[in-house]
Amino acid sequence: HGPLLVHCMAGIGRTGTFIAAHICLQRLKDSRTPNIKGTVEKLRTQRMKMVSNVSQYKFIYEVVQELENTLNFAKNSPNFDNKSVQQ
């Protein structure tokens, strides 16, 4: 996979939300803790106001929770194959 380009009108709110969600999902897939608050704080050191409102934070948490639920369901499945989750 090549580089990912994301942009919205101002390049902070929705863009930051998508980037933060993507980073957290990658961390979760790599069996690491998806530190949402820390991820957003790190993004904000590079560009002010990334993830600019509560609904955007909520969206990130919902996306991460959805993947967590899916991974937990898959791990409890008799046909679980960790390699397919990594793709």
Image: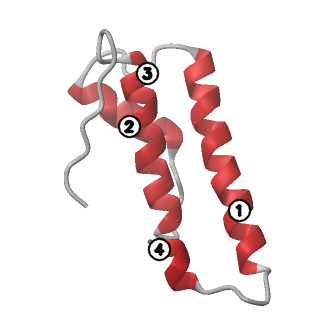
Task: Say how many tags the image has.
Answer: 4
The span from disc 2 to disc 1 (Cα, nearest Å) is 20 Å
x then y, percent, for residue 27: 45, 59
Identified by mark 1, the residue type is: Thr
The span from disc 1 to disc 3 (Cα, nearest Å) is 24 Å
Instruction: Name which of mark 3 and mark 4 comes first in the sequence.
Output: 3
Instruction: Name the residue carrying label 1.
Output: 70
What residue do we see at 30% from left, 10% from top? Answer: 10
Instruction: Name which of mark 1 and mark 3 comes first in the sequence.
Output: 3
Quadrant of residue 44 within the rendered picture: top left
SS of the residue under disc 3: helix
Identified by mark 3, the residue type is: Arg
Figure colour scheme: secondary structure
Identified by mark 4, the residue type is: Gln
Instruction: Name the residue carrying label 3.
Output: 14
Instruction: Name the residue carrying label 2.
Output: 19
x then y, percent, for residue 12: 34, 18
Residue 32 appears anywhere in the view: no
Q: Are marks 2 and 4 in contact (CB under 8 Å)?
A: no
Relative placement, left or right, of 33 versus 39 is right
Q: Are marks 3 and 2 in contact (CB under 8 Å)?
A: no
The span from disc 2 to disc 4 (Cα, nearest Å) is 19 Å
Instruction: Name which of mark 2 and mark 4 comes first in the sequence.
Output: 2
Q: Which quadrant is home to the C terminus?
A: bottom left
Above or below: residue 7 compared with residue 9: below
Relative placement, left or right, of 64 versus 23 is right
x then y, percent, for residue 20: 43, 38
